[in-house]
Amino acid sequence: MVQTLKGGCLCGAVSYETEADPVIVAHCHCVDCRKSSGTGHGTHVGLSEEAVKFSGEIKFYDSPADSGNIVSRGFCGDCGSAILSRNSSMPGMAFIRASSLDDPGAVTPSMIVYASRAPKWDIMDPSLPSFAEMPEGGPEKVIADAQ
């Protein structure tokens, strides 16, 4: 069922909208997601980037993932809110931060990755498939399996 997803940053300088269904929604407990979210994990909504209309200036910070791929994390340069990330191994995909959605309840996570790195106080949903690290084949395979 196609729904409109809207969101943006805290100060309103950056916004986005899409009518595309997410390819995947996942919690990630890797160190980078924890640090960039300011909590125990980041929740990512994977979408075709061409299906998302962004407005406002998004600044990016690039860093290598465990795999050696480059992850570009996009945020508002004014208020610092995390908006999306991109992975060099998956061109054309945008991973919107669920925390930036106007209605975060509009999406439902389907898996947990890097569960072995979760702080013990960040309780995980035991009904979700959980992987200690990134599953074999990396995020590309996870997305392909989800489709």
Image (cartoon, helix red, strand yellow):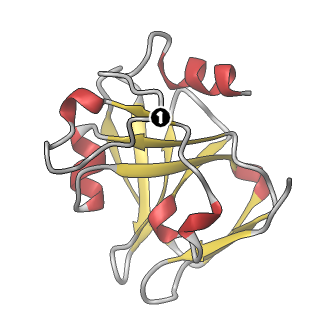
| Residue 25 placement: quadrant | top right
Q: Quadrant of the C terminus?
A: top right
| Residue 118 in picture, x, y percent from top left | 21, 39
Q: Is residue 85 left or right of residue 32?
A: right
| Residue 143 placement: quadrant | top right
Q: Is residue 28 left or right of residue 25?
A: left
Residue that mark 1 sits on: 128
Q: Name which residue type carries label 1.
A: Leu
Mark 1 nearby-residue class (10 Å; few <14, some 14–19, many ≥20)? few
| Residue 40 in picture, x, y percent from top left | 23, 51
Q: Is residue 92 left or right of residue 89?
A: right
Residue 71 vs 40, above or below: the answer is: above
Residue 22 vs 146, above or below: the answer is: below
| Residue 24 in picture, x, y percent from top left | 62, 39
Tell me the residue at 34%/82% (across/down).
Answer: 79
Residue 46 vs 37, above or below: the answer is: above
Front residue of 104/83: it is 104
Tell me the residue at 30%/49% (across/down).
Answer: 41
Tell me the residue at 29%/31% (across/down).
Answer: 115
Dot 1: element: loop
| Residue 119 in picture, x, y percent from top left | 15, 43
